[in-house]
Image (cartoon, helix red, strand yellow):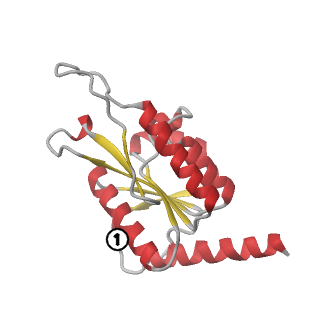
């Protein structure tokens, strides 16, 4: 299968690089898709503190640039997970609203433990799937089984190396967005 045929399903899950590198690639994809005239919804993860990235995580809305903190301060000696579920709920709701207003492509930072348990951005994934919108995300190799259980035949993995190839994003988005619009037109008729 050539690079042009990789990414033919509704959902593409990137793998093969560090989380920060994948988030940068997702942000680049958002800019390129918007530049091509597509409406893009979703969130990208980043950190306010490069020295302690897990202690200052946030999600940035691709729809309006809002920032949702998904880290909570548990004190200087804390070793516990500092994920703030409230921030995830707010970010998820914003993405769902954006999908409901109309979008062409949804980019979601990742499918992780929270989503596998039905929390985090799971409802945003569900809204995108229900709306038939193409989705780009990231999935850790440790979450592969849960991802397959969640998406079934709707998704495929694409390596970061392939996704970076010239023309891959254009081919993927054109194929899926065109088929989505044709599907919408058929439903209207």
Residue count near mark 1 (Cα–Cα under 10 Å), binned few <14, some 14–19, many ≥20: few
Q: Is residue 49 left or right of residue 148?
A: left
Q: Is residue 51 left or right of residue 132?
A: left
Q: Is residue 98 above or below residue 83?
A: below
Name above or below for residue 65 compared with residue 55.
Answer: below
Residue 89, position as x, y percentages in the image: 50, 37
| Residue 39 at x, y percent in the picture | 53, 69
At horizontal 48% and vertical 78% (from top left) the residue drawn is 4
Q: Which residue is mark 1?
A: 164
Residue visible at 24% across and 34% down? 55
The residue positioned 41% from the left and 51% from the top of the image is 109
Q: Is residue 100 above or below residue 182?
A: above
Q: Name the quadrant of the C terminus.
A: bottom right
Count of numbered labels shown in the rendering? 1
Is residue 107 or residue 94 the one in the foreground? Answer: 94
What residue lies at 54% left-to-right and 44% top-to-bottom? 93
Which residue in the rendered view is the most extreme toward the right?
189
Q: Is residue 14 visible?
A: yes
**Percent of width and height locating residue 161:** 33, 67
Residue 3 appears anywhere in the view: no
Left or right: residue 9 compared with residue 170? right
In which quarter of the view is residue 30 placed? bottom left
* Secondary structure at numbered mark 1: loop
Question: x and y percent of residue 162 in the render?
Answer: 38, 69
């Amino acid at each position: 299968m050539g690079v042009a045929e990789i990414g033919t399903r509704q959902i593409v899950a990137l793998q093969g690089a560090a989380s920060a590198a994948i988030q940068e690639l997702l942000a680049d994809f958002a800019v390129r898709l918007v530049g091509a005239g597509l409406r893009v919804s979703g969130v990208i993860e980043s950190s306010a503190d490069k020295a302690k990235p897990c202690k200052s995580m946030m999600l940035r809305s691709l729809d309006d640039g809002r920032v949702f903190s998904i880290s909570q301060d548990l004190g200087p000696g804390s070793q516990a997970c500092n994920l703030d579920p409230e921030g995830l709920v707010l970010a998820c709701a914003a993405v769902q609203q954006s999908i409901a207003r109309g979008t062409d492509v949804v980019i979601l930072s990742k499918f992780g433990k929270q989503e596998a348990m039905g929390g985090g951005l799971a409802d945003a994934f569900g809204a995108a799937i229900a709306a038939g919108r193409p989705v780009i995300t990231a999935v850790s190799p440790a979450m592969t089984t849960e991802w397959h259980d969640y998406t079934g035949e709707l998704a495929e993995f694409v390596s970061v190396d392939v996704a970076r190839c010239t023309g891959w994003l254009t081919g993927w988005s054109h194929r899926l967005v065109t088929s989505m619009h044709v599907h919408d037109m058929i439903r209207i008729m």
